[in-house]
């Protein structure tokens, strides 16, 4: 079976975490028997520096582990006209696809990641070249795709693709005419995080996220102040892994709360480094407004840590009383109370049980789901 993955995002710009799950998905597919996979990515360069774009290489190939990514660059004119940008994106994808076919066999299935723009352009391609299309939605702002300027493009996708999403709640509001739909969650390299856990002294909290709007790290910092002052837990430390444009804001907030000696901002880390960090902590915290899935939450469970999470959708599908605590978004006192409760009841959370939950999202289980969808489409064809 020959699969061509078409992502909307790919980790090759300033944000090397953006779309990294697409890359890991391709690597996992490439390891499966009788599956051949490659990736075709349209890289959208910002309009802010058109002169720089003129001298850029317009197409190139990245050799990855078990597959190749074929990249075509285009100038992003969305600020001028969204419809014009969508038309140009679809045209760029078809040109890149035609070039791809010169040296590669015609794919059996196109698998687009995110409805707009990749899903829409892939559906146009599939319709023209008679190739079935799967679209997997990852975006936390996916509801925006169903209204305004996006609506006509999304409706075209829903009528011409097998629509999947990384969490169940994302499928709940689909129109009744959408019959082909399923959850294909993000996959997690769970084995990487299964280090031997050793006794940890004190409350050691970990958080892994990009420093973007909606992650609400400030809520965790405020909750930490309550844990120290009101719950009288003095032997406590918070390790925050990540980076982003809100880094200075979060560091200032930490300083304002007089928490500098309790908190370490350690920057971006590799997967192996994160595994080691998680193994040195005993409570993981998610404070987001909205998460479609939240891979770090699964990584924490795989490491054997209970998770305190806000009710931010995605994590609600794997966090319960047996794996941690769910709290209201923005409720700092509730976050502090939940962290203290989990810490005081760590013996309740069995490492093997936590890892069993994480293994639902292992590379094998997730690629099994995807392959079943591909087979279903090919049988229909």
Image (cartoon, rainbow, N blue to C red):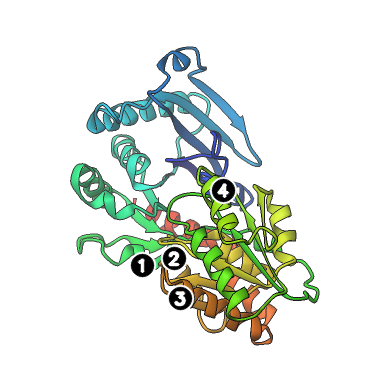
Up/down of 5 relative to 322, above or below: above
Q: Which mark is residue 314?
A: 2
- Classify 10 Å Cα crowding around label 4: few (below 14), some (14-19), many (20 and above): few
* Helix, strand or loop at mark 2: helix
Q: CA distance from mark 2 to mark 4?
A: 29 Å
Task: Say above or below: 275 vs 55.
Answer: below
Q: Name the residue rendered at 45%, 75% in the picture.
A: 327
State which tag comes first along the sequence, 3 or 2: 2
Q: Secondary structure at mark 1?
A: helix
Q: Position of residue 28 (x, y in %)?
A: 60, 52
Between 381 and 90, the residue placed more toward the observer is 90
First along the sequence among labels 4 and 3: 4
Q: CA distance from mark 1 to mark 4?
A: 30 Å
Q: Nearer the viewer, residue 291 or 164?
A: 291
Residue behind mark 1: 169
User: Which mark is first along the chain, 3 or 1?
Assistant: 1
């Amino acid at each position: 079976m020959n699969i061509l993955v078409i992502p909307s995002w790919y980790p090759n710009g300033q944000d090397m975490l953006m779309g990294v799950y697409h890359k890991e998905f391709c690597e996992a597919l490439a390891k499966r028997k009788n599956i051949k996979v490659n990736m075709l990515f349209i890289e959208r360069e910002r309009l802010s520096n058109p002169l720089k774009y003129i001298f850029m290489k317009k197409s190139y190939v990245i050799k990855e582990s078990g597959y190749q990514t074929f990249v075509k660059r285009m100038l992003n004119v969305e600020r001028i006209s969204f419809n014009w940008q969508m038309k140009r994106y679809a045209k760029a994808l078809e040109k890149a696809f035609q070039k791809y076919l010169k040296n590669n066999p015609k794919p059996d299935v196109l698998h687009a990641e995110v409805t707009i723009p990749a899903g829409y352009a892939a559906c146009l391609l599939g319709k023209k070249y008679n190739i079935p299309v799967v679209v997997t939605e990852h975006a936390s702002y996916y509801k925006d795709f169903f209204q305004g300027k996006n609506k006509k493009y999304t409706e075209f996708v829903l009528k011409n693709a097998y629509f999947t999403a990384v969490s169940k709640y994302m499928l709940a509001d689909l129109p009744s005419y959408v019959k082909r739909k399923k959850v294909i969650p993000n996959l997690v390299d769970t084995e990487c995080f299964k280090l031997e856990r050793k006794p940890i002294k004190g409350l050691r909290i970990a958080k892994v996220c990009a420093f973007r709007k909606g992650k609400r790290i400030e809520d965790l910092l405020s909750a930490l102040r309550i844990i120290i002052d009101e719950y009288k837990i003095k032997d406590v430390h918070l390790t925050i892994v990540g980076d982003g444009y809100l880094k200075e804001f979060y560091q200032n907030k930490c300083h304002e709360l007089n928490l500098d000696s309790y908190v370490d901002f350690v920057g971006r880390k590799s997967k192996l480094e994160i595994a080691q960090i998680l193994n040195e902590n005993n409570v993981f915290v998610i404070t987001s407004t909205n998460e479609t899935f939240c891979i770090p939450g699964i990584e924490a469970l795989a490491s054997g840590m209970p998770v305190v999470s806000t009710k931010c959708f995605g994590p609600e599908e794997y966090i319960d009383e047996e794996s941690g605590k769910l709290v209201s978004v923005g409720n700092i006192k509730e976050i502090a109370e939940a962290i203290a409760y989990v810490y005081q009841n760590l013996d309740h959370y069995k490492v093997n049980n936590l890892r069993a939950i994480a293994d639902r999202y292992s590379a094998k289980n997730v690629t099994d789901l995807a392959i079943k969808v591909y087979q279903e489409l090919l049988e229909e064809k």
